[in-house]
Amino acid sequence: MIIWITGANGFIGRHLVGVLADQGHAVHGIGHGAINEPERQRIGLGEWLNGEIDAANLNTLAGRSGLPSTIFHLAGGSSVGLSIAQPLEDFSRTVSSTARLLEWLRGSAPECRLIVASSAAVYGAHHAGAISEEAETQPMSPYGHHKLIMEQLCRSYAVSFNIRATIVRLFSIYGPSLRKQLLWDLCLRLGQGQRELVLGGTGNEHRDWIDVRDVVRLLARLAQGDSRHLKVLNGGSGIGTTVAEIARFVTTAWGGDINVRFSGLARAGDPFSLVADSQQLAALPFTWRIPVEQGIGQYVSWFKGQAP
């Protein structure tokens, strides 16, 4: 298959390129950032277009690679905090880019399957326990609102123009090469010699932590086809882990005498609990392979092998 990945130079994108290339697909990408020839060959990426997702650039990529049979749409805003600081920029990255991609598909590649990375942030704060795909969506941040608008655009094009879209609401992704968010911050501070860590919140916040290596297996699995024009899936394991437990996994893997405490102050835009109902994934079937404690131990090992 000819496969395109928007945001192929990002955290998830680079992992996904490798998996799909190993499966024998021709993988091409569009998004931001320069990737030189040796690096493209190393990760398995064919054509790479450094630029905005718009009709001109998509036509250029099609001229180089041929029309895609599947597009993984990973481009978009990736931070609650940045969406609060720069909401218009987040809107442009998530909503405007999706609208331009869908319109290009309608006119140029209407048979292409679109697999879209959304977020559990669309659910908001008013849920306890496992959240099903039918649960009410009440985003708390511009990031969550923009992901929900992106989903609604996909729904509109599926209903009106028969675009085939699969939306995956991904939960708390971590793994090798992640250079932001909680795990990166903890490891940076430990690497600086800190042995007294103060974190925001209460420590009792629950998240559904999923290793990026499992996430890209799931995305690749979804490329195998589905006849429905619109499908919405939770990308989560169904297992909730508290932030306090995550901090303990990190400090245990790091080693030494490390004390962690919590300020009790919640960050704006952060729900208390986000854990997936994973029944639809189990029915695919799909199984998560990497337990969170093991994955975090491997993340710490990866971090220690880097030069931050």
Image (spheres, grey):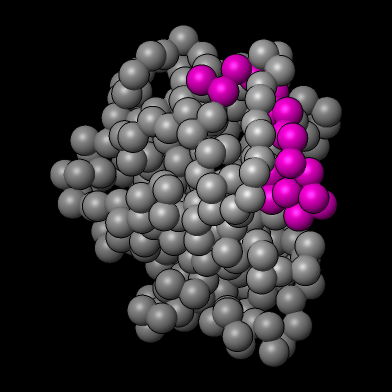
Vertical placement of residue 84 versus 281, above or below: above
In the picture, residue 28 is in which quadrant?
bottom right
Quarter-of-image position of residue 268: top right
On the question of residue 308 being in view, the answer is yes
Measured as percent of width and height from the top left, residue 293 is found at: 42, 48
Q: Nearer the viewer, residue 3 or 205?
A: 205
| x 63%, y 50%: residue | 256
Extreme-front residue of the structure: 257
- Quadrant where the C terminus is found in the figure: bottom right
With respect to residue 196, does 211 lie above or below? below
Give the image location of residue 207, x and y in percent: 47, 31
Q: Is residue 22 above or below residue 239?
A: below
Can you give x and y, in whole percent of width and height, for residue 107 in the image?
Answer: 53, 55
The range drawn in magenta is 186-204
Residue 41 image-quadrant placement: bottom right
Residue 203 highlighted magenta (yes or no): yes
Residue under the image location 32 percent in, 23 percent down: 130
Q: Position of residue 169 (x, y in %)?
A: 44, 37
Taking 134 as reference, is 208 left or right? right
At 51% from the left edge and 20% from the top edge, which residue is drawn? 204
Can residue 51 be spotted in the picture?
no
Q: Specify whether residue 54 is painted magenta.
A: no
